[in-house]
Image: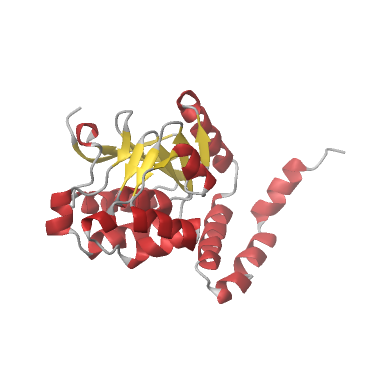
């Protein structure tokens, strides 16, 4: 398949968005931002979709982010806004890191709810080496996910981190041998599929707000009380109850 913009496939209740430039380390072109927005917009209309998976074509790189030329000439607020949208997307999101992840692609991975990596994965954030002060949304995500000390380490040194260190500091949610990647992903997706979709979405929304320091959201009880009175809760509890 020729290199091109990110693709979207939907099968088995899963939407997969794949970066399609393996010969160029699955770089993200500025024109891809509109494509990614359109993909997410389409997925949001599909009631059968339970989760979104981001991955890269080939077997070497998840994504290398923007090229140097794109950073120089076309980096603007659009990329940050896109990633904020991924972070707040209603459905569970999973980044499958089957290879290297660099630059802005590391932030895209952090926008996802899970990051499953394989042995041999590496990451680095070269912004300071370029002389680029990274945009606020990305800095916030790094500090929120990894803590200030690790975020400073990554941004202020530009050092490469190996998979085991990515797992230790919390960048990776899970680290598996390459041969177990698809099985691990399938198990995670199957677990999501067993859960009540509306509750998954409402809890993700509230968890995101709590993580962002929203005190009112942390204390909000509306979604809890709605689910407590729902017919779906009764149905599921009845199904799990021992038969007399």
- Residue 188 x/y as whole percent: 54, 38
In this picture, residue 101 sits left or right of residue 132: right
User: In this figure, which colouring scheme has been used for the structure?
Assistant: secondary structure
- Residue 219 x/y as whole percent: 63, 73
Q: Residue at x 36, y 44 (%)?
A: 160
6 or 172: nearer the eye? Answer: 172
| Residue 223 in view (yes/no) | yes
62 or 37: nearer the eye? Answer: 62
Q: Residue at x 25, y 54 (%)?
A: 129
170 or 17: nearer the eye? Answer: 170
Q: Looking at the image, is 81 positioned above or below residue 189?
A: below
Q: Residue at x 87, y 38 (%)?
A: 244
| Residue 50 in view (yes/no) | no
| Count of picture labels | 0
In this picture, residue 186 sits left or right of residue 120: right
Q: Quadrant of residue 79?
A: bottom left
Q: Residue at x 51, y 49 (%)?
A: 169
- Residue 29 x/y as whole percent: 19, 48
Quarter of the image where the N terminus is located: top left
In this picture, residue 91 sits left or right of residue 193: left
The residue at the far top in this view is 179
- Residue 8 x/y as whole percent: 30, 40
The residue at the far right in this view is 244
């Amino acid at each position: 398949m020729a290199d091109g913009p990110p693709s979207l496939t939907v099968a088995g209740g899963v939407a997969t968005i794949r970066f399609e430039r393996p010969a160029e380390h699955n770089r993200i072109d500025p024109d891809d931002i509109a494509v990614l927005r359109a993909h997410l917009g389409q997925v949001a209309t599909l009631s059968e979709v339970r989760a979104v998976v981001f991955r890269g074509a080939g077997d070497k790189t998840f994504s290398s982010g923007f090229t140097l030329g794109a950073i120089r000439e076309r980096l603007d607020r659009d990329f940050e806004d896109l990633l904020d949208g991924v972070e707040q997307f209603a459905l569970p999101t999973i980044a499958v890191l089957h290879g290297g992840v660099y630059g802005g692609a590391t932030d895209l991975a952090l926008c996802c709810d899970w990051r499953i990596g394989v042995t041999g994965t590496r990451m680095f954030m070269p912004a300071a080496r370029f002389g680029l002060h990274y945009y606020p949304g990305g800095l916030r995500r790094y500090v929120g996910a990894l803590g200030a000390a690790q975020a400073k380490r990554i941004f202020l040194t530009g050092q490469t981190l190996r998979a085991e260190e990515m797992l230790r500091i919390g960048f990776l949610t899970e680290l598996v041998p390459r041969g177990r990647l698809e099985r691990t992903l399938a198990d995670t997706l199957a677990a999501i599929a067993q859960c009540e979709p509306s509750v998954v979405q409402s809890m993700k929304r509230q968890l995101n707000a709590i993580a962002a320091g929203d005190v009112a959201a942390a204390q909000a009880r509306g979604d809890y009380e709605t689910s407590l009175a729902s017919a779906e809760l009764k149905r599921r509890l009845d199904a799990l109850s021992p038969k007399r």
